[in-house]
Image (cartoon, grey):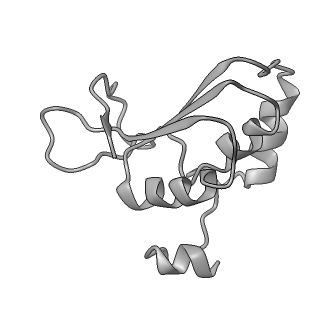
Amino acid sequence: MALLTSLGFSQPIQGTRVGRPWRQRLADLLACEVDYAGKTVLDAGCNVGILAYEITKLGPSFIHAIDGSRPVLNAARLILRSVETPHRLDLARHPHWSEPVDPGTDPSVFPNAVEA
């Protein structure tokens, strides 16, 4: 929690806007029984990168994580720093908006992600 507080988060991160905790989201993801070994994984709306971090334990060749919030992406960068899996983190921005957008509340597609 001290790490997240130092990044400017004052509230505990719940995992999703609908209130499902990270453990449930991870259980749902693993229940799909996808073989991630050797594959490239896109985590769109990665939040702080917890699911991407857990997927790295399943042997993907590359993780690409994107999110619309720079503070959240900075937290994901710190979390994914501890993994050996090659990865890239990008801030999703729409070319016509000057501020990062929240993929959880905006249905737009972000075709022009820029590196954070």
Instruction: Tell me the residue at 60%/54% (across/down).
Output: 81
Looking at this view, is 15 or 18 the one in front? 15
Q: Is residue 15 above or below residue 63?
A: below
Can you give x and y, in whole percent of width and height, for residue 1 in the image?
Answer: 65, 78
Can you give x and y, in whole percent of width and height, for residue 102 in the image?
Answer: 37, 46
Number of marks in picture: 0
Can you give x and y, in whole percent of width and height, for residue 11 in the image?
Answer: 55, 75
Can you give x and y, in whole percent of width and height, for residue 66 in the image?
Answer: 45, 38
Looking at this view, is 49 or 101 the one in front? 49
Q: Is residue 96 above or below residue 8?
A: above
Instruction: Tell me the residue at 30%/22% (across/down).
Output: 111
Looking at this view, is 111 or 23 the one in front? 111
User: Can residue 11 be seen in this snapshot?
Assistant: no
Is 16 situated left or right of 66 in this image?
right
Instruction: Tell me the residue at 87%/28% (across/down).
Output: 31
Instruction: Tell me the residue at 48%/74% (across/down).
Output: 9
Looking at this view, is 69 or 57 the one in front? 57
Image quadrant where residue 3 sits = bottom right
Is 58 situated left or right of 17 in this image?
right
